[in-house]
Amino acid sequence: MSLPTGTVTFFFSDIEGSTRLIQQLGERYPDVLLAHHTLLRNAVAAHSGNELRTEGDSFFIVFGSALDACSGAAEAQKALAQHAWPDGGQVRVRIGLHTGEATLVGNEYLGLDVHRAARVASAAHGGQVLVSETTRALVDHVLPPTLTLKDLGLHRLKDLARAERLFQLSIDGLPGEFPALRTLEATPNNLPTQLTSFIGRDDQVREARQLLTRSRLLTLTGPGGTGKTRLSLQIAADVMDQFPDGVYFVPLAAVQDPELVPSSIAQALAISSTAGRRLIDSLLDHLRDKRTLLVLDNFEQLLPAAPITTMLLEGSPGLRVLVSSRAVLRVYGEQEFPVPPLALPDLKALPSLSALSQFEAVRLFIERAVAVKPDFRATNENAPAIAGICERVDGLPLAIELAAARVKLFSPQALLTRLEKSLSALGSGARDLPGRQQTLRGAIQWSYDMIDAPGRRLLARFSVFARGGSLEQVEAVCGPAEDVGGDVIDGLDQLADQSLVRRIPDLSEPRFLMLQTIREFAAEQLEQSDEAAAIKDRHVAAFIALAKQAQAHVFGSQRKEWLDRLEMEHDNLRAALDWTFATGDAKNAMQLSGVLWRFWQMRGHFDEGRARVAHALALPKSRDYPAERLQALEAAGGLAYWQADMESAQRFYDECLELTRETGDKRALANALYNAAFPNVVNMRESERPRALLLEALPLFRELGDQSSVGRTLWGLGNGYYFDRDYPTAKTTLEESHAVFRTIDDRFGLGWALHTHGLVSLKMGDTETARKDFLEALQLFRDDGDVSGMVLQLDNLSQIIRADGDPVKATRLASAAKLYQRSKGINIGRLLSEQEGRTGREGLSEDDAERVWAEGQTLPLDQALEEAVAAARGATTSEDRRND
């Protein structure tokens, strides 16, 4: 679809009273909605309209010509009016047209004129077509005789922008009289004019509207810069028709004395004080019989005045109060509504440019960037940087707007580089804003100044947590209670009430999170104190304890739970390691990296893991701690093995073996023997020494009663026989390891034993046993989130599918397997393929293989696994049918 650019006309429509229609028509509504869609699409298509988006009963269409837009709208209303709707199912559609310019990003238009067109439509009634001044100017003298324009005067729309003259497109043969427009003039109000568009937040506006029907006091909370004021104004504009006696905005940012809140409200309502009478009584008399909405903005510094809201609500049954505040009011009947940051894309899986622009944070950045630099364009080249900027500033609207203003000086790529070093690169905003809103730092400082000294100390200490912390670690690091004015968790709860930290309740246990923008500020406060080093040392100790606790579970039935927990804490583990490196703490650096290596291996963090362990081993005092060095050497060897760097793996493992023979520790020696056997086995260098090492380890493990290691050693011997091409002995040995792993419920060991047994079965021509082995292994790895295991089983199943006679599907999946082996650093899969002489393209011509291989390179891992399982199981079903 080729979309028009330059000056275009936007068409928005929706069905008036659609909720009522759904209730009245019940099961007949889908047919009515389909008829509406068909009639409207036919009408606009006949006049060159381009349908951009349909959501429920609403349409967003763009025309290259304003005249075509008017003609399409008129034809749509005629078709809808003439259609035979069922009883009680008359469909009345409101349509708004506005002409302007917008930035085209992919297949999405961004800009103020798009929002303006939507607001024009929202002011209309069913059956009515509203036209903006800019559209009228283009069509006034060229409309056909059957269409005329009626001047409806100046109106402020619900986008809170300046007043604009609106016109009604009158259509011959259709009704031309409608009630007063749904604009701000319909209700008494003092809502201030906004100079910029309101972007996104549709879900929050909808939820807040619903909450206001149930709660008479709704408090929007959030940190500075999150857009509470703008959201409260938009909510007020959207609910205006529910408050015929008025909607009044009460700005409180400049008020410091709680005693002055009543006079601020009175001023907004234009109520004069009377001598000898309390102002609160005058307010109650004025509001008592009225349906009114008060919007109290920036209440956080006036919390002692919170009971005033209760007094007004108790004395005025028709009153609703909408508050914006960084802290909850803590009065009876209050409904808190935490305002989240704007929606962000996943930086690890960025969508297309067009889809990326649908994210609120990205859309805000692009629109504000165009406002300061009209020739700014979002492209495939700068889109990742734009997404990165939005993520770096936590999706906070104020920070995004400040960042967008910097595109006059920096490209998005250059700006992101500067922001990764410091948020000071954001600079300051408009001079006519309050000082605390001109800079992000000013907004945070405002909140920080309002908490007491113990709260500030707790906030600073909590800044050592990267991406949040769970209760156990938070209490260990941030206490004791006497340092922070009481219980640590209660203190964090109070900071959450002040919007300086966030509660994350939807997990197995409560967790607290600090936005990165606030964390950077709090970390500065910690560095300026005399306790920064001590708190960071506590943080390291807490996460070493957690990693050790997890290590005991990574082979058992709770493996996924613990791996998920380590994944959630990965940023904290990184921060802890960074501190050990910065301070030269070799003991803790080696200890932590040593216990984390299985997590890095199972979750595909090979490159990072190897770099971390290498750094720990290279620290000057690393040889002063032999026990911890042994842990780190084993980790280095394991990660090198999985990356098919067998020479490095052998070197690390041999050093481990040398150290353990000196200690006389049987368990450590047996483990070192097991590890030292593997690289040469897989590298097909030799088999006698590795087998001797494993046979030396096996009785030691049996003597120790370590069944898991007995199973692993049998698996190692089976691997050796496999690489020696002694398939019958390999099969028997591996089946013995299966039995051990199943007995003790070692899911990790069983998965890899099935993997090798499947490979042996393939070599022996037993495709069906191999199929069952690979499918069972894959299920185990998927259940536990073991990325390495999943990727290797994907490659294995591609061999099964090729043997089933489907080289196209097999090549597609082999390509996906190679993609994730490369991106995750699982090089052992590549090594095994090379040893077997497999390219993954067998059975296809060069051209076909190239085409199918390219398809596989685009597959998400989950989709590739689903296709592999379906294809492998499908063949099994077909075979079963043939055998029946």
Image: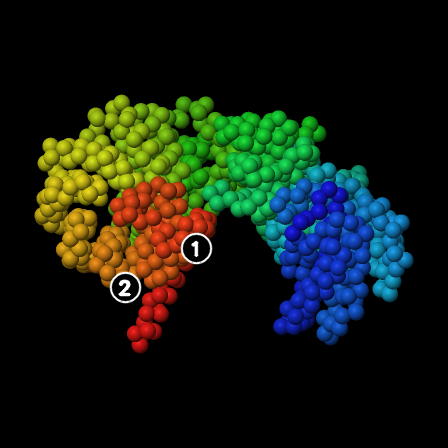
Amino acid type, mark 2: Glu
User: Who is closer to the viewer here, 632 or 366?
Assistant: 366
User: Who is closer to the viewer here, 804 or 497?
Assistant: 804
Q: Quadrant of the C terminus?
A: bottom left
Q: Is residue 165 among the parts visible in the rendering?
A: no
- Residues marked 2 and 1 touching at CB (< 8 Å): no
- All told, the count of numbered labels is 2
- Work out which residue is located at the far bottom of the displayed protein and give it: 884
Amino acid type, mark 1: Gln
Q: Where is mark 2, residue-wise?
A: 768
Question: Considering only order in the chain, which callout, 1 or 2, is on the residue closer to the N terminus?
Answer: 2
Callout in the foreground (2, 1): 2
User: Who is closer to the viewer here, 290 or 393?
Assistant: 393
In the displayed structure image, the side of residue 262 where residue 497 appears, left or right: left
Residue 22: % across, % down: 66, 67
Residue 639: % across, % down: 28, 39
Q: Is residue 153 among the parts visible in the rendering?
A: yes
- SS at badge 2: helix
Name the residue at 88% across, 60% down.
146
- SS at badge 1: helix
In the displayed structure image, the side of residue 293 where residue 150 appears, left or right: right
Name the residue at 80% across, 64% down.
78
Query: Marks 2/1: CA distance?
Result: 23 Å
In the displayed structure image, the side of residue 863 where residue 759 appears, left or right: left
Name the residue at 37% across, 47% down.
818
Q: Which mark is residue 863?
A: 1
Say above or below: 273 vs 580. below
Name the residue at 28% across, 40% down.
644
Residue 519: % across, % down: 48, 33
- Crowding at label 1, few (<14), some or many (≥20) Cα neighbours within 10 Å? few
